[in-house]
Amino acid sequence: MNRMQIAVLGVAAVAFGGAYLAFNALSGAPSAPQVAAQQANAVPLVRVLMASAEIPMGSPLNAANTQWKDWPKASLSDQMIVQPTSGPMDEDTKGALARVAIFKDEPIRKDRIVKAGGGGLLSAILPSGHRAVNVQIEGNVGANNQSFVNAGDRVDVIKIARDDDQSKAKGVEVMTSQTIVENVNVMGVAGNMATLELDPQQAQIVILAQKESNAGLRLALRSLVDSGGEARTVAKPQEAATGGITIMRFGSGN
C-alpha cells in the first residue's frame, strides 16, 4: 500500500468518526461516558407483587389479578412480597385471600392478605382477637333500592328500649336511646342482617343489648371523615342491659 492510499484511508476514517459523533449529537444518543454515569446513578430496583386489578375483600389472589413489577429497593417494606430469584413462589400467597380491598397497582402486603385454611371466608378475614356478630337492622333498603349500610362502612350501634316503668307512670310511651359502641366496621350485609367486627367485650355488650326485652338495635352510619381508628366502647355490659341515657316521649303527658 503506497502513501497515497494510506492518506486516503486516514482521511476517510477521520471523516467517518466525525460523522458518527455529529449523528450522536443530533440524535441525542448518550456518549459512552454518559451511559456509564447513568448506570452508576441508576436507582436499585426489586420486583414485588402488585395488584394488576382491584381485589375485593375476601377475593383470592391469582395470576389474573397480580403481577410482578419493579419497586425502588430503598422504599421496600418488610411486609411487601419480593419475587424470589430462585425456588418456589412465596408461601404467603398460596391460597391467600384479601383481608381488605386491595386497589389496582397497589403493592400486596402480607398484613393485607390471609390464608383461608380449613374454615369459612368470614373467619379467614376476621382479624385475630376480634369477633363477628350479626345484628338485625330494619329498613336497610333506601332510595333507588340501594342498601343504607354496606360492607366496609363504619357505624355506631344504638340501643332503643321502652321504659315500662316510666311509660306506666306518665301514661305515655317513654323510649330510651343509648349509643353502646362507636365506629364499628361492617364486615358484610345480607338483606336486613349486618355482620359487625367487634372485640370480645363489645360483642358481649351488643349481644346482651339484643336480648333485652322491649329493646332493639339501630345502626347509625358514620361519615367517612369520622371513620378513622378503631371501634370504641361507650357503655359497659351492665349499662347496656339496664337502660339508656336519653329519654324521648311520644304523645303528651299529664
Image (cartoon, rainbow, N blue to C red):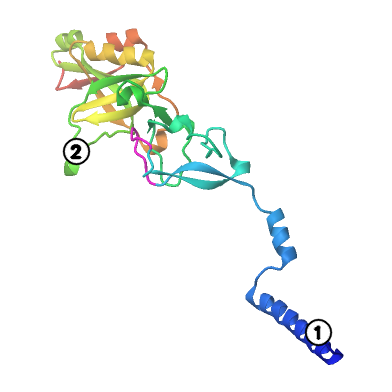
| Residue hosting label 2 | 142
| Residue hosting label 1 | 10
Quadrant of image for the N terminus: bottom right
Three-letter amino acid code of the residue under disc 1: Gly
Q: Marks 2 and 1: in contact by CB < 8 Å? A: no
The answer, for residue 78, to whether it is visible in the render is yes
The answer, for residue 244, to whether it is visible in the render is no
Indicate which disc, 1 or 2, sits on the residue closer to the N terminus: 1
Q: Principal SS element in the magenta part?
A: loop
Q: Residue at x 32, y 12 (%)?
A: 204
Q: Where is 112 relative to 253, above or below?
A: below
Range of magenta residues: 53-61
At mark 2, the secondary structure is loop
Q: Quadrant of residue 8?
A: bottom right
Three-letter amino acid code of the residue under disc 2: Gly
Quick one: 81 or 155, which is closer to the camera?
Answer: 81
Q: Residue at x 17, y 13 (%)?
A: 214
Outermost residue to the right: 3
Percent from the top left, x then y, of residue 235? 36, 15
Q: Quadrant of residue 113?
A: top left
Q: Which of labels 1 and 2 is toward the front?
A: 1
Quick one: 119 or 88, which is closer to the camera?
Answer: 88
Percent from the top left, x then y, of residue 186? 32, 29
Q: CA distance from mark 1 to mark 2?
A: 88 Å
Q: Residue at x 72, y 77 (%)?
A: 21
Q: Is residue 52 left or right of residue 69?
A: left
Quick one: 204 or 171, which is closer to the camera?
Answer: 204
Q: Where is 67 relative to 195, above or below?
A: below
Percent from the top left, x then y, of residue 206? 30, 16
Quick one: 104 or 169, which is closer to the camera?
Answer: 104
Quadrant of image for the C terminus: top left
Q: Which mark is residue 166?
A: none
